[in-house]
Image (cartoon, rainbow, N blue to C red):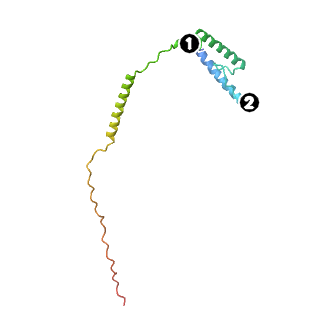
Amino acid sequence: MPPTQSHDPDFLRAALIGLQQALSNIEQRIADLRGQLAGQPAAKTTVAGGGGPLSAAARARIALAQKKRWAAYRAAHGGKAAKSAAAAPKTQKRELSAEGRARIVAATKKRWAAFRKAQQAAAKPVARKAAKPAAKKAPETAPVAAAAPAAQPAAQ
């Protein structure tokens, strides 16, 4: 018989939870395969722990409990309308003076003028010395031999 090892209870609980999740995954796969064999699609809605499909009554109970929790939360925190009105007091909008606007317009025009000037300077071609074209030589042709009658031996 192997010697008994003492383990931390938390470690054992974690191992148990892991094995239970693995078991529930395997059971879910088995249920899916049985559904496919029977020609029925597998149920998609399952409990968070993977315990199986939820009934309509169970889904209704969960929805009702969630609505109850949200109602309690909203009551404790003042609801939507009260929260938005209290959290965001209306701040006065700042206005731009005519003098400030004129300065902005002048600075913008100055920047655009500098930009256009830089674009024009970049667009001008740089003056280059015109290179003289090299004189092309006429292609050399092989002298064509004059077509002289070939000397034929006299036939007698």
Q: Which circle, 2 or 1, is nearer the viewer?
A: 1
List the single residue furthest toward the top.
Answer: 76
Residue at point 33% right, 40% down?
Answer: 120
Q: Quadrant of residue 146?
A: bottom left
Q: In the figure, is residue 77 to the left or right of 106?
A: right
Camera-nearest residue between 29 and 3? 29
On-image quarter of the C terminus: bottom left
- Where in the figure is residue 41, as x and y percent of width and height? 70, 29
Inspect this view and state whether residue 108 appears: yes
78 or 108: which is nearer to us?
108
Judged from this view, the residue extending furthest toward the right is: 38
Tag 1, which secondary structure?
helix
Q: Earlier in the sequence, mark 2 or mark 1?
A: 2
Percent x, y of residue 37: 72, 31
Task: Name the amino acid type tagged 1.
Answer: Lys
State how many labels appear. Answer: 2
For residue 38, the mark is 2
Report the disc number at residue 12: none
Residue 53 location (% of width, % of height): 69, 22
Give the farthest residue toward the bottom. 156
Determine whether 137 is above or below 154 in the image.
above
Q: Nearer the viewer, residue 76 or 47?
A: 76
Mark 1 highlights which residue?
83
